[in-house]
Image (tube, rainbow, N blue to C red):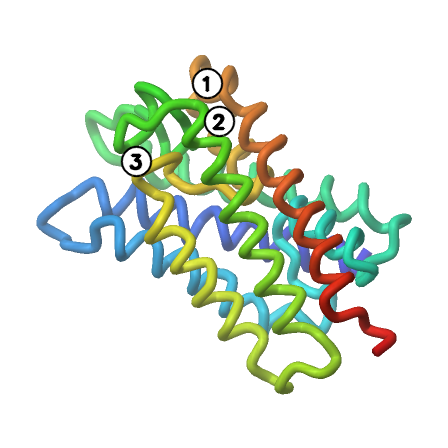
Amino acid sequence: MKKLLAEFIGTLWLVLGGCGSAVLAAAYPELGIGFAGVALAFGLTVLTMAYAIGHISGCHLNPAVSIGLWMGGRFDKKELIPYIIAQVLGGLAGAAILYLIASGKPGFEIGGFAANGYGEHSPGGYGMKAALITEITMTFMFLIIILGATHSKAPKGLAGLAIGLGLTLIHLISIPVTNTSVNPARSTSQALFAGDWAIGQLWLFWVAPIIGAILAGLVYKYLSPETD
């Protein structure tokens, strides 16, 4: 239960910090954070939680990460479903807090609520094929970074930094395409508040990250198994 609570809190912080920066700050050009600021905010949520709860739960904060670590031989299968449930619930709690804050301003309209999308709901107008390729590739690289940075032979104490900066880079690349998911829990939390189109497109932001994570787990297990 301590692990699950840690994952709940960590995913709540990821959604509140990352999506909150998009909804509360990036929406106002005069504040000047833009895409780069949102990308950094997501990276900072993971970086801070890596050192806060990494020793408790491993700081997955993402169903795709849990699946990728399992495929890479780093995570027990029996913990997979409970972790995913805790992450989704944590994301929903973060989105609910964000909604309560954002709706406190007169004239608030929920709009996209930092949800992920493709086609007319892509920030740059990218289609479904581009979104699918982007989410698979970005999640694959994210898991490669995670599996490498947390390997027993990797430099100690620096995993959180590498993972946080890796997520920042991923957002810098892919925000224009899909608003960046690489995390089904993050996508679900925002889609349920945005409704309609976001829920209709949510399938891609579960399928693509999971495919990318599975591929990364298999590849990294081949490249550098822990038994070496």
- From the image, tell me which residue sits under label 1: 195
Residue lying furthest right: 78
Tell me the CA gap for discs 3 and 1: 20 Å
Foreground pick, 34 / 119: 119
| Within-10-Å neighbours for mark 3: few <14, some 14–19, many 20+ | few
User: Is 138 placed above or below 228 here?
Assistant: above
**Is residue 93 visible in this depiction of the protein?**
no
* Pointers 1 and 2 in contact (C-beta within 8 Å): yes
- The mark found on residue 212 in the picture is none
Query: Which picture quadrant has residue 221?
Result: bottom right
90 w.r.t. 115: above or below: below
Which residue is situated farthest in the bottom direction here?
156
Q: Farthest residue in the front direction?
A: 223
Give the camera-side residue of 126 and 43. 126
What's under tag 1, amino acid-wise?
Answer: Gly
The image position of residue 145, as x and y in percent, is 57, 64
Task: Pick whichever of labels 2 and 3 is earlier in the sequence.
Answer: 3
Of the residues under marks 3 and 1, which one precedes in the sequence? 3
Q: What element does badge 2 sit on? A: helix
- Residue bearing mark 3: 104
Which residue is under mark 2?
191
Label 2–label 3 contact, CB within 8 A? no
The amino acid on which the numbered mark 2 sits, given as a three-letter code, is Ala
Residue, x 43% and y 15% (percent of image)? Answer: 197
Q: Left of 159 or right of it: where is 151? A: right
Q: Amino acid at mark 3?
A: Gly
